[in-house]
Amino acid sequence: MTGTDSPTTADRVRQIAVAVSAVLAIIGSYIGSGAAGGTQVQNAANGALSASSTPIAPDGPAFSIWSVIYLGLVAYAVWQFLPSQTTREHHRRLGYWVVASLLLNAAWILVVQAGFLILSVFVIIALLGVLARIFVIVLRTTPSGVVDTIITDGTMGLYLGWVCVATAANITAALVGSGIGSADGPAAGVWSIIVLAVAGAVGILLAIVGRGRIAPMLSLCWGLAWVAVGRFTGELLSTEAGVTALVVAVVVAVVTVVVRVSRGRDRAALVSA
């Protein structure tokens, strides 16, 4: 669809659902920040998600990326209401998946605030799965232009890349909190290298499948860089985890750029053929 056919009732319901879920996600973020007088997410569940809880935990400033992601999600909620966007297949296919991601996001915050760390793992894995589905839809549909690409594709890419890092940190925190492994034991360096390598493999997969999409790479590398900062300067020091996080971030960035440049050359070759 090009966005020129008449809106249906289903279109209006979808738009409202996206807008309402965006508001709920913002409220959840407000609660999670501790601005409402409660406990900040990183201090909830006995500090299991703090910057010094495990070698995979990003340093505090890393979480400022949520401000950019939430801003993008609010922009998307407004954008999909515009007459030129209402009936586009791009948004029709994305709408309820975006709703699911926003509700899971809010649910994760509430679950962590309640101290249910193990349950939070299942919630964030579900969120990651939804975002992966959104990524596939973005790849298979065509945005209406540069603005749509930035607001829709860019926001969803940042969201996915960051949640990849957050999922690794969340699972690791839950395992350590359950007594499986130690944050600073003899084997901590080994398993942190393994987990970070897996995160890097996911980043490379996103680069290849996404044909060099920049947004997922930026947020994933942002998270990894702050893992390194936390391991070199924070309370929980780990040279192994810090070096691995930096190496993985560089590899993911380089692979993404190479894939993107190669894709550009392929396009140029097709045009000139």
Image (cartoon, rainbow, N blue to C red):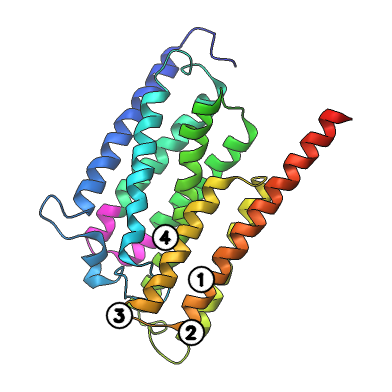
Q: Amino acid at mark 1?
A: Ala
Part of the protein shown in magenta: 109-121
Q: Earlier in the sequence, mark 3 or mark 1?
A: 3
Percent x, y of residue 197: 58, 71
Separation (CA) of disc 3 from disc 1: 17 Å
Q: Mark 3: give few (<14), some (14-19) or many (20+) Cα within 10 Å.
A: few
Q: Marks 2 and 1: which is nearer the front?
A: 1
Query: Between disc 1 and disc 4, whose residue precedes?
Result: 4
Residue type marked 4? Ala
Q: The residue tagged with tag 3: helix, strand or loop?
A: loop
Instruction: Tell me the distance, in whole angstroms, between the alpha carbons under discs 2 and 4.
Output: 19 Å
Q: Which residue is mark 1?
A: 245
Badge nearest the viewer, 2 or 3 = 3
Q: Mark 3 highlights which residue?
A: 235
Q: Residue furthest right?
A: 273
Which quarter shows the C terminus?
top right
- For residue 64, side relative to residue 189 (left or right): left
Separation (CA) of disc 2 from disc 1: 12 Å
Q: CA distance from mark 4 to mark 3?
A: 19 Å
Q: Amino acid at mark 3?
A: Glu
Q: Amino acid at mark 2?
A: Gly
Circles 1 and 4: CB atoms closer than 8 Å: no
What numbered label is drawn on residue 189? 2
Residue drawn at x 38%, y 86% is 184
